[in-house]
Image: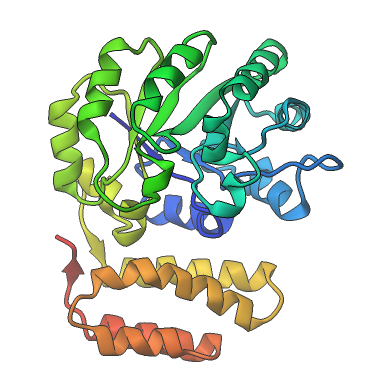
Amino acid sequence: MKRYFAPMEGITGYVFRNAFEKYFGNIEQYYSPFISPTQHKCMNNREKNDVLPSHNETISLVPQVMTNQAKQFLDTAMVLADMGYKEINLNLGCPSATVVTKGKGAGFLGRTEALHSFLEEVFTKCPIEISLKTRLGMEEKEEVWGLLALFQEYPVKEWTLHARVRADFYGGKADVDLFEELAKRCTIPLCYNGDIVTMEDHKNLEERFPWLQAVMIGRGFLANPALARQIAGGKATTKEEFWAFQEEICMGYKEIMSGERNTLFKMKELWSYWERMFAGREKEVKSVKKASSIATYLKAVEGVLDASYGTFLE
């Protein structure tokens, strides 16, 4: 079963991806945070920098695009094809209210006729292969059956299905049973997404679906950077390794961002996931979150690691 790193807006950009691959790896494919083309531009400078081949030399990256306009999708696909990409992923899963109200992301799932017309045009004209990342539907899980019928009309390279509806956001429990029912009727290669945060979660999924070709994980890989390596039979994260990993990300952000404040904001966002590795070290983690400079941040991280023992998340 291949392991994909889910795209997470504002978190899994190229600085993070390269550091993750260097220290932990065991990821077959990464997906970029979504590119959101406009009427006048396929991608802004930040989005372009994120998918530049020169910024992703050590990893296998699939750019993800979120739009409900076929021309914008195709124009962006042409630019990506010129960069050397062979696949583009359409985001039909983002549950954000600002996205959904514009009929994009998961909001596109509820506009069946418009989605059909969109897919008809892009699959006819796109110069590279198209994969999909979706939810079960907007409001009701049963919507997925209509999506299945629609998607099977086209040569979809792969369908990553987050087994929740948009109304669930990231709460509740992913519906693995419905995923299993869908898989029995689906002719499109499937990738499962949802609630895989531990080695046990992955083992249970692998035992239940030995035929499944891929799983996509986001929060699990953030909360435990060594999870993919452990799944593959490797070791847990060490203090020294985690220190080097987070330091490389911090210095990478410092190089491309203006001001320490922006760098610290990005690092503290990551610590909202990383803190789960340091149960019992809440006082030291709090110092990380209160840091007002990169120097005090790094000192605080040293404090967290000094208070920990050997390896963690065994």
Where 48 sits versus 118, above or below?
Answer: below
Instruction: Please state, as top left, top right, bottom left or bottom right, where the N terminus lies in the image.
Output: top left
Q: Is residue 70 or residue 30 the one in the foreground?
A: 70
Please state the horizontal and vertical placement of residue 169, each as a whole percent of the image.
40, 50
Where 289 sits versus 112, above or below?
Answer: below
Residue 107, picture quadrant:
top right
| Number of marks present in the image shown | 0
Instruction: Please state, as top left, top right, bottom left or bottom right, where the C terminus lies in the image.
Output: bottom left
Task: Specify how the rendered protein is coloured.
Answer: rainbow
Q: Is residue 45 visible?
A: yes
Q: Residue furthest right?
A: 40
Residue drawn at 36 percent across, 48 percent down: 168
Please state the horizontal and vertical placement of residue 46, each as a whole percent of the image.
71, 55
Please state the horizontal and vertical placement of residue 226, each as a whole percent of the image.
29, 55
Residue drawn at 42 percent across, 65 percent down: 245
Where 73 sits versus 189, above or below?
Answer: below
Please state the horizontal and vertical placement of residue 126, each as a whole percent of the image.
69, 18
Residue 271, picture quadrant:
bottom left
Residue drawn at 13 percent across, 46 percent down: 200
Position of 313 with respect to 171 (left or right) is left
Q: Is residue 69 or residue 311 the one in the foreground?
A: 69
Position of 199 with respect to 96 (left or right) is left
Q: Is residue 5 visible?
A: no
Residue drawn at 18 percent across, 44 percent down: 201
Position of 184 with respect to 164 (left or right) is left
Q: Is residue 152 or residue 237 the one in the foreground?
A: 152
Residue 42, picture quadrant:
top right
